[in-house]
Image (cartoon, rainbow, N blue to C red):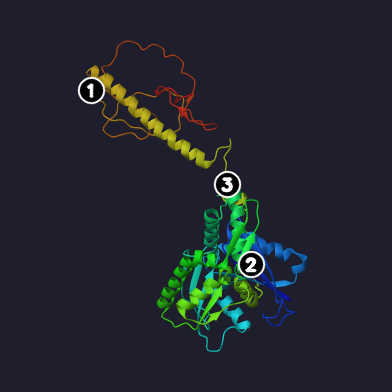
Amino acid sequence: MSAVLGVSVGASAVRMATRTDHYHSADQPGAFEQQAVDVVTGPVEDLAAQSIGVLLEHEWHGDIGATGIVYGSGVDADAIHAAMARQHLWNYQLVPEAAAVVTLLESVGQLGPDTHTLVLYDLGSTGVTISVVDRYTRSVITSERSDVVGGDQFDALIAEQQVRERGHERPVDTWAAAELTARCRTAKEQLSTIGAVCLPGDRGLILLNRERFDALIRVPVEGSARLAREVIAASGRRPDVLVFLGGGARIPLVQSVLQGWLALPIVQPPEPEMVAAQGAALLAAPVEATPEPALPEPNWSDTATTPVRRLPGGATRKQLALAGSAASGLLVIAAIGLALDRGDDTTSQREPAVSEVIVEQTTPTTTPPRTTTTTTTPTPTLAAPVVTADREPSTTAEPTPPPPPGPRYLNLPAPIQIEVPPGLQLPPGMVR
């Protein structure tokens, strides 16, 4: 491994710092090759993963053997893991922000031997994060983030001042507002090192000096100093130094106000917005990670593990069993209905009531049912429902019966066939 990559993920930009083995100390000039990618749209963790993937594929960075990614200050570790997995990147490790900052400050000699507790004041574009950190455990004792102050807020204050005091036209659309905001941001950055700025543009000049700029931002900066006091009090620790991080830490008024409110020695890194990324590069180490295996495709042939036994005609035993149960139920219902109908007829003719109805499921035949006189003991070998009643003997000769009709079958799915006994009356649609 001859190079390592450190990445910090912020609300406005993804910053990357690459360090090679040609440099033995992080404080040497050019020890880090640095890049920043502005966040325009989409989740910031996806932009970070995509940027890392593009950087690693570039021929100039083919020797990068380890990557460290800072998490913290609102950046969710699980979201970073998911974004890296979507890019099929596995050789990386997540680095706590406090550990990355302390590591970089120690490497450049900005922490003395008596420094135990640090206050990190990280002023970014969307807000400020104030943390009390233990140097030797690299742990955060207490931390709080607030939007009481931020770089975007400073840009908006400058834009409003230019409209009200310098006669600039108020933007009427998104593009005009974005152009004015960009020029105000440039003016803010230049005022960190010079006393006045004059920026030309299509909608007029932006003229601003540091005194007017300080007056615009003093109130929110003092609000952040008050918040820092509260965070320190909540930690129960006595800090040794105040460390400025983030692009907003370059503003001279921020440094003077915080030092006046907290009365702490100041540590000002030369590149405060890159401290976390550089520290992550120093802590990066190769990771022998095996990507999670993809879920196997379902084998639909395994779903029928039990063979289906089919009988002649294509019907399975399960089908026949279901059909037999259905047929038995239909026969019982039909027999009872037929018996009730005949009982009503005999009652109307003042004949004795039915003494007993016996239904037995047997193999159907084409022979007409016989009429017999039943006793109190049922005969289990009868082939069809029989209704008995006491009748007087008839002296009239019985006419010759007509030939029996053809076989009838229950209306069941093919190839199942269950024959219906002749004379058994079933509702329409049940017989075919």
In depth, the one of 361 and 103 nearer the eye is 103
The numbered disc on residue 15 is: 2
On screen, 112 above or below 158?
A: below
Which circle's residue, 2 or 1, is located before the other in the chain?
2
Which circle's residue, 3 or 2, is located before the other in the chain?
2
The reply to whether callout 3 and callout 2 are in contact (CB within 8 Å) is no
Q: Which residue is mark 1?
A: 352
Q: Position of residue 245 (x, y in %)?
A: 56, 73
- Three-letter amino acid code of the residue under disc 3: Asp
On screen, 369 above or below 122?
A: above
In depth, the one of 398 and 316 nearer the eye is 316
Graded by Cα atoms within 10 Å as few (under 14), some (14 to 19) or many (20 or more), the crowding at tag 3 reads: few
Q: Which residue is mark 3?
A: 173
In depth, the one of 278 and 244 nearer the eye is 244
Q: Disc 2 and disc 1: Cα gap in Å? A: 104 Å
**Residue 105 falls in image quadrant:** bottom right
